Image (cartoon, rainbow, N blue to C red):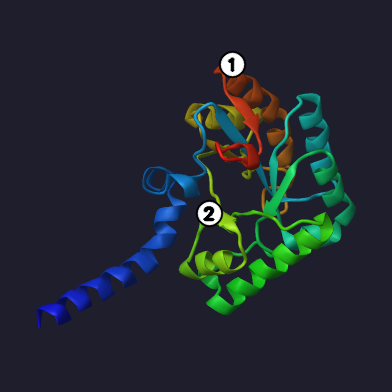
Amino acid sequence: MTGLRLGAKVGVAACAALYAGPVLTSVVPLRTRLTPALAGIGRADHVALTFDDGPSPLSTPRFLQMLEEHSIHATFFLLGREAVRAPGLVAEIVAAGHEVAVHGYDHRCLLALGPRHTYADLARARDVIGDLTGSAPRWYRPPYGVLTSAALLSARRLHLTPVLWTCWGRDWTARATPWSVCHTVVGALRGGGTILLHDSDVTSAPEAWRSTLEAVPAIIDAARGRGLGVGPLREHWHEA
């Protein structure tokens, strides 16, 4: 009888974890404390600079130029559907020394997808990006930072490592300004952190990327002023 009760409790706990997982991973303070690797916490003298939702022929080239001017490489989490529309731009990102990663094929919240569709979305994006770059992507970030058990299992099967973020610029809103983006990021920035920004307005307010573009140099200067290196995720861990 005791064994049955224990088994029931374990079953309830497992179900609770299944449904609580997306909630926990979407809350930055919780995931930073409970799952530091998933939150993107790396070595203390470095911060990872990452961009979501590209590539965009209108905006991404301007980010590439700006990053080159500041001698910075970053990680670009690409949407498969956007990569297909701009394959030459994907090649430019890689040729410039940046890292590309998977943000899914379509920008859909995973809570709305079942296991089969979740796997299909990740696999399609991984294959597209791998074919365009000539190498298998390493990292995966789900839209909205919401991870489900199906996404975690799919990522494992596809040899993708989920990475979220520790601070963001809230740069997708119509109210965002260069000052607000910079202030929001720098206020939460710590050594070892991962910064989330957007290099396109595919899922953001129209032309919201302009505020991000103007804010990034100040963010880089602030990080460097604290003695922190800035670069892609591949340089973020000691083993990298």
Report, in whole angstroms, how far the alpha carbon at label 2 lies from the one at label 1.
29 Å
> What is the x, y in percent for residue 95?
85, 42
- For residue 165, the mark is none
Q: Quick one: label 2, few (<14), some, or many (20+) residues within 10 Å?
A: many
Q: For mark 1, give the secondary structure.
A: helix
Nearest to viewer (mark 2 / mark 1): 1
- Asked if labels 1 and 2 touch by Cβ distance under 8 angstroms, the answer is no
Nearer to the camera, 105 or 187: 105
Q: Position of residue 103 (x, y in %)?
A: 65, 57
Query: Which residue corresponds to the image point at 70% horizontal and 38% vertical from the top-left?
Result: 74
Point out the residue furthest to the left here: 1
Q: Quadrant of residue 178?
A: top right
Q: Where's the N terminus, which quadrant? A: bottom left
Q: How many marks?
A: 2
Residue under pointer 1? 225
In the picture as drawn, the residue positioned furthest to the right comes out as 88
Q: Which residue is mark 2?
A: 145
Q: Amino acid at mark 2?
A: Gly
Labels 2 and 1: the sequence-earlier one = 2
Against 188, residue 234 (above or below) is below
Task: Establish if 169 lies above or below 219.
Answer: below
- Where is residue 226? Give x, y as percent: 54, 18
Q: Is residue 66 visible?
A: yes
Q: Kindly identify the amino acid type of the residue bearing the numbered disc 1.
A: Gly
For image coordinates 83% across by 38% down, the residue present is 96
Q: Residues within 10 Å of mark 1 (few under 14, many from 20)?
A: few
Q: Nearer the viewer, residue 173 or 124?
A: 124
Residue plotted at (82% across, 62% down): 84
Would you place residue 137 above or below residue 95 in this image? below
Q: In x, y percent, where is residue 240?
A: 61, 40
